[in-house]
Image (spheres, rainbow, N blue to C red):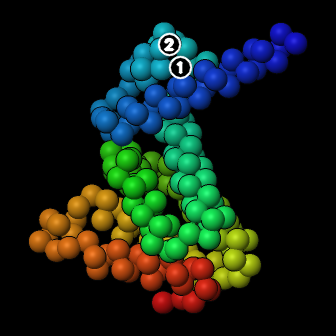
Amino acid sequence: MARRADQADGETTAAKLCAAAMAEFNAHGFAGTDTNRIARRAGFAPQTFYRWYKDKTEIFIAAYRAWEEAEKAAVERLMAEDAPVEALVDVAIAHHRQHLGFRRSLRQLSLENPQVRAARAQTRLRQVEWIRNWYGRGEVADIATQLFELERLADAVAEGEFADMGLDDAEGLAELVRIVSGLRTGETA
């Protein structure tokens, strides 16, 4: 019985550290924070961090996995409600906007860190399989291509890149709707 309580406490500690890491990475970027700040933000002494995570990269990957699961849960909820495609796009954009700093670090680390690059590839493969299972069809390469388009456009809209060019988000949003519709119907670009 005591072991179960310890395990539950450990899962809570790990989850608190992971949530604190996400907040730190989102606010300060990967390079702008350290494990001590993450532990303190979670309400723990700095040495507690190393009982649960090997280093900052490991917790970044854990935070990325939590980000992935949160996005998937939001999309699944809308799909179960048979929400319109526009609602799926809106939830994806909102999720990206809530994590701008984290997403920037993710893009940068994917170029610089083989562990993060591999974790990102695994996330994308899980997303492809999830889409294939949900809709019961689709070629891996076609779905992956659409996911790359979705991800980049969602980041561009979330970060205001269209506005930076003096453009309205409408074209980007319309393209996102077209891509998501294609994923739903199995049609490729």
Which mark, residue 49? Answer: 1
Q: Is residue 65 left or right of residue 111?
A: right
For image coordinates 17% across by 66% down, the residue present is: 163
Question: Residue 99: horizontal and vertical position, in percent?
Answer: 38, 47
In the figure, residue 27 lies in which quadrant?
A: top left
For discs 1 and 2, the disc positioned in front in the rendered view: 2
In the rendered structure, which amino acid carries the disc numbered 1? Phe
- Pick whichever, 170 or 82, lies toward us: 82
Q: Is residue 9 left or right of residue 32?
A: right
Q: Helix, strand or loop at disc 1? A: helix
| CB contact under 8 Å: marks 1 and 2 | yes
In the rendered structure, which amino acid carries the disc numbered 2? Phe
For image coordinates 82% across by 18% down, the residue present is: 4
Q: Is residue 129 left or right of residue 110?
A: right
Question: Residue 50: horizontal and vertical position, in percent?
Answer: 56, 19
Circle 1 crowding by C-alpha within 10 Å: few under 14, some 14–19, many from 20: many
For image coordinates 34% across by 29% down, the residue present is: 33
Q: Is residue 82 above or below residue 184?
A: above
**What residue does disc 2 label?**
44
